Image (tube, rainbow, N blue to C red):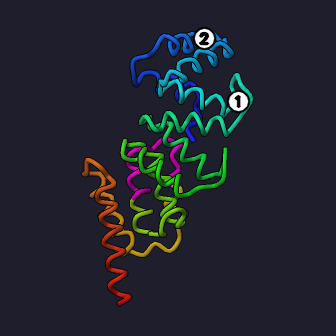
Amino acid sequence: MKSLILTALFASILSTPALADLEAGVAAYEAGNVPLAVKEFRASAEKGDANSQFNLALMYEQGIGVSKDDKQALAWYRKSAEQGNSNAQYNLAVLYENGRGGAVDFAKANQWYRKAAVQGDALAIGNLGMLYLRGQGVKADRVAGLALLLLSATMDSSPENHAKQNISSTRGLTPAVIAAAQTLTSEMSQAKNLLVPLDRYLKNTAANTAGQLK
């Protein structure tokens, strides 16, 4: 979960032209007037601003100026995510993966991690890899899982990214799996859309498995 609230708030604001209510919300937050910030972010969010929707969701998720409410957080993250906000897509996926704001839904977690991953979100790429390693919402595939973790680790070495630790703790990785994963990682890193080589690999693997069963 992207949990550094100041970074999350202001990084998202910088990504698009701010509306008046959004600017007022930022000013209020910087001044320490959190209730007013919530009011202004809500006004902007209700007008459809994706960044304000993300900020409001984050405040509901963490209980900043409002009562903590995962259902409200999920609803506002979804509105922002549907407009393409990658931070919201990632956080929404985390909520679905952990059953916060509703039932656990690995399929939806996979869906939103994929959308954030396409936009280059390293944490989403790593979490998507863990879904493949565990077979949660997708068919388990160690090559795909490891490849995504390797890509995530190369993109983001910050303490917030646990990709390297997850690679180290993954048991039973054979030389063949590691080699195949490294090849896939290279293909994904060079692709404009990393899902293209990933999905191609998964499709070929499924076809090969089906052929062996005949």
Query: Quadrant of residue 156 in the image?
Result: top left
Residues 94 and 185: in front is 94
Circle 2 sits on which residue?
28
Distance (Cα) linking label 2 and label 1? 17 Å
Image: 17 above or below 77: above
Which picture quadrant has residue 105? bottom right
Q: Is residue 130 magenta?
A: no
Q: How far across and how far down the image is residue 141, in percent? A: 44, 69
Q: Is residue 71 above or below residue 17?
A: below
Judging from the image, what secondary structure is the residue with disc 2 in? helix
Q: Residues within 10 Å of mark 2 (few under 14, many from 20)?
A: some
In the picture, measured across the screen, residue 192 lies left or right of residue 58, that is left
Residue with the most extreme right position: 67
Magenta span contains residue 157: yes
Q: Is 71 situated left or right of 19 in this image? A: right
Q: Residue at x 36, y 74 (%)?
A: 206
| Label 1 packing within 10 angstroms: few (<14), some (14-19), many (20+) | some
The magenta-colored residue range is 148-164
Q: In the picture, residue 178 is in which quadrant?
A: bottom left
Q: Position of residue 128 (x, y in %)?
A: 47, 55
Look at 47% across and 49% down and name the residue there: 113
Q: Earlier in the sequence, mark 2 or mark 1?
A: 2
Residue to which mark 1 is pinned: 63
Q: Is residue 65 left or right of residue 166?
A: right
The spot of residue 142 in percent (x, y) is: 45, 69
